[in-house]
Image (tube, rainbow, N blue to C red):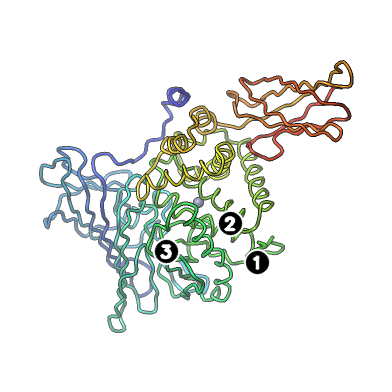
Amino acid sequence: MALVVCCALSAFAQRRERVVDTWRPLHYDVKLVFDQQLSQLEQASTEITGLILKDNIEAIDLDFGALEIDSVVTENRQAGFERKPGEVLTVSLGRPTRVGDRFNITITYHGRPKDGLIFANDRDGKPSATGDNWPNRVHHWIPCLDHPSAKATATFTVVAPPRESVVANGKFMYMTRNGAAHSVWRFEETKPIPAYCMVVAVSEGARLDATEPTVTPLSYYVPRRDRVYAPKGFSPAAPALAFFSTTIAPYPYEKLALIVGATRFGGMENSSAIVFSNTLFDLRRNEKLSRRFGVPDRIESVVAHEIAHQWFGDSVTESTWADLWLSEGFATYFAGLFIEKYDGRDAFREYMRGAAERYFNYEKQQNTPLHDTETQDLMKLLNENNYEKGAWVLHMLRRRLGDDAFFRGLRAYYNAHRDGNATTEDLRKALEKSSEKPLGEFFARWVYQSGHPVYEMASKVSKLGGRGREVTILLKQTQQGAAFLDPVPVEITSGREKRWIIIQPKGKEETSKIRVRSGAMSIRVDPDQTLLKEVVIRQQAN
Ligand SMILES: [Zn+2]
């Protein structure tokens, strides 16, 4: 298998990941008390309920940043703990454990996290606090197992000054006002979510409820200056929720809050509480507008992208960072499908062409497989491989398998891994089952190896007896690495005659012959863009 070869060659450079091994978190009960100035956590506590996965585990390694710890308690007793390099907090359980045992650890702490929970003035100049955790920054404010394989449910109790409004993952349970001093807010997320999707957002901005019909309660939390534009800016949200619900499965969470706030990304897909960049609604000059929604294409695609993540990334989460394309490639492609449905086929083709161009530019600098087990800096995985090439791999699978088998396979994949984790192999198997076609070769070349086909095409016309001619087509692949064995559609126009052939490469050079009647001739490789490829046409010899 190609996969084995690739791992063997590069074993020394494998990225080590903090995957679930000896224990897994089941639930985080997070309590945060903000100070009056909204400048730090006056007090905080997280109770972790976990499950033991191996016998005789004596201590639990948590990820936790530099905040000062006030106490660590397990089973109602003070627990021994040690802070280790690499932001690890080891807590002694103080008893023998067996597989299947549950444990509780409560850590009480305070201070201003150096990352993950961002304290910043919002666009109205008012203080705000916003969680922003991708890929593994949540442990700066919530002690946890900070890896996407460790999904857990979570509850948040937030004490904040009464002028603030608070939103977090999950269902809003209550808000009580305690005199003029503070308010207490509680949210409960009953679905297991990835650690990087745990969020709390505190601000003095405006809260608006969507007025159109929606599949889940939908509201917007924006700085006051954005309150007039927000309903229009977020107008693609309700149709995106409806479209993905019918295309994949019902919306996975209890509500959806769309927040404009502090994130270092264009948008961050926290489960049921998406945070968009502060500049989302800053309209730029000469921006191209969506025909359907009248908002810049940029806003439409990022809103659809982050909403698609609620299914792919949040509900079905990548098992390792090498599987990140199952999150980013899906969100990128589903934003494209949304554009295809609402703005039409031409807009979709343009979207996919733009994606291909960005990937080609990236690939000139950086040649790594989509399933990337080596890149050490996780931020560098936010690249055109995981987004644009990932989207194109899905597009090619759709074209190859047909809409029916493709979407049936995706629904089966989603339902099998909903609220859990999935690997690239899980996706391959689901699509093989729905299409009854083997996809090992496709995944080996497109996903586990790097690059894309660069076709160089030359053709020669020879006269046959009578008026017929024969066109010989030589299709070479000049990219580094192995050949792509995907069928290549070629369109030959000769006079008024249009012929199609499908070249089925068996290696890096393939010769095909086709008869045409006569006349001047033009040849196009894959004019319907079923493949992520570059094409060089050599001078045609007549
Ligand atoms: Zn994304």
Q: In which quarter of the image is the C terminus?
A: top right
Residue depicted at x 47% and y 74%: 209
Q: In which quarter of the image is the N terminus?
A: top left
The vertical placement of 397 against 295, above or below, is above
Residue that label 2 marks: 301
Q: Callout 1: helix, strand or loop?
A: loop
Question: Which is more foreground, mark 3 or mark 2?
Answer: 2
- Residue 342 lies in what quarter of the image? bottom right
**Residue 269: image location, x then y, percent:** 46, 56
Residue depicted at x 72% and y 38%: 527
Q: Are the residues flagged by discs 1 and 2 in contact, CB closer than 8 Å?
A: no
Q: Which mark is residue 294?
A: 1
Q: Callout 2: helix, strand or loop?
A: helix
Of mark 3 and mark 1, the one earlier in the sequence is 3
The vertical placement of 402 against 8, above or below, is below
Which residue is nearer to you in this view: 344 or 532? 344
Q: Count neighbours of disc 2 (C-alpha within 10 A) and say few if under 14, some if 14 to 19, many if 20 or more.
A: many
Residue depicted at x 37% and y 65%: 168
**Residue 89: image location, x then y, percent:** 25, 48
The vertical placement of 110 against 312, above or below, is below
Please state which amino acid type lies under the numbered disc 2.
Answer: Ser
Q: How far apart are marks 3 and 1 (CA)?
A: 29 Å
